[in-house]
Image (cartoon, rainbow, N blue to C red):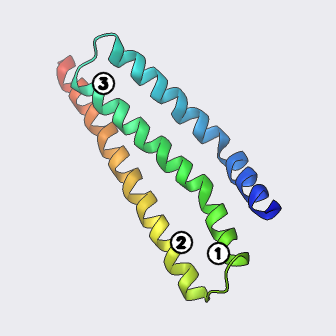
Amino acid sequence: MEMYGSAIVGGLLSSIPVLVGWIVAVVLAAIMLKRGGARAERFLVAGTSLMLSQSLITAFIAVITTWLTFGRDITNVEMASVTGAFGLIRGLIGLAGIICLIYAFWVKFKAGK
């Protein structure tokens, strides 16, 4: 069990700057939405939340690979398949977050003209 704990701590420590950045972005976007934000602010909250969840998934991929490597007797192909599936999910969440962020800035840019 200690092996999993060190994997969690290592994954989180290497991701702390990114996680703090996205947490601050979510809080600021929520404040903007609460102060009378419209559609752009809603998409900003959604995009920053998706990017935060993508960063959390990235932090815990180290735990998954540790569990698969030392906790189970599986082949390298099976391990690559499982980690690849998590990577695909992480990538799709990140893509959705980026699309929401781009749309939020586009709507805000168009409203400013």
- Residue underneath mark 2: 83
Q: Residue 1's spot in the image, x, y percent? A: 79, 63
Amino acid marked by disc 3: Glu
Residue 57 drawn above or below residue 18 = below
- Count of residue discs: 3
Residue 79 drawn above or below residue 87 = below
Q: Residue furthest top?
A: 35
**Which residue is drawn at the image coordinates 79% and 64% (left, top)?**
3
Disc nearer the start of the sequence (2/1):
1
**Tag 1 secondary structure:** helix
Label 2 with label 1: CB-CB less than 8 Å: yes
Residue 30 drawn above or below residue 93 = above
**Which corner quadrant holds the C terminus?**
top left
Left or right: where 55 falls relative to 6: left
Left or right: where 55 falls relative to 45: right
Amino acid marked by disc 2: Thr
Crowdedness of circle 2 by 10 Å Cα count: few (<14), some, many (20+)?
some
Q: Residue 13's spot in the image, x, y percent? A: 72, 46
- Residue underneath mark 3: 41
Residue 101 quadrant:
top left
Crowdedness of circle 3 by 10 Å Cα count: few (<14), some, many (20+)?
many
Disc nearer the start of the sequence (3/2):
3
**Tag 3 secondary structure:** helix
Q: How far apart, in angstroms, are the residues tagged by discs 2 and 1? A: 9 Å
Amino acid marked by disc 1: Leu
**Which residue is drawn at the image coordinates 34% and 31% (left, top)?**
44
Label 1 with label 3: CB-CB less than 8 Å: no
Disc nearer the start of the sequence (1/3):
3
Q: Which mark, residue 68?
A: 1
Q: Residue 53's spot in the image, x, y percent? A: 48, 45
Q: How far apart, in angstroms, are the residues tagged by discs 3 and 2? A: 34 Å
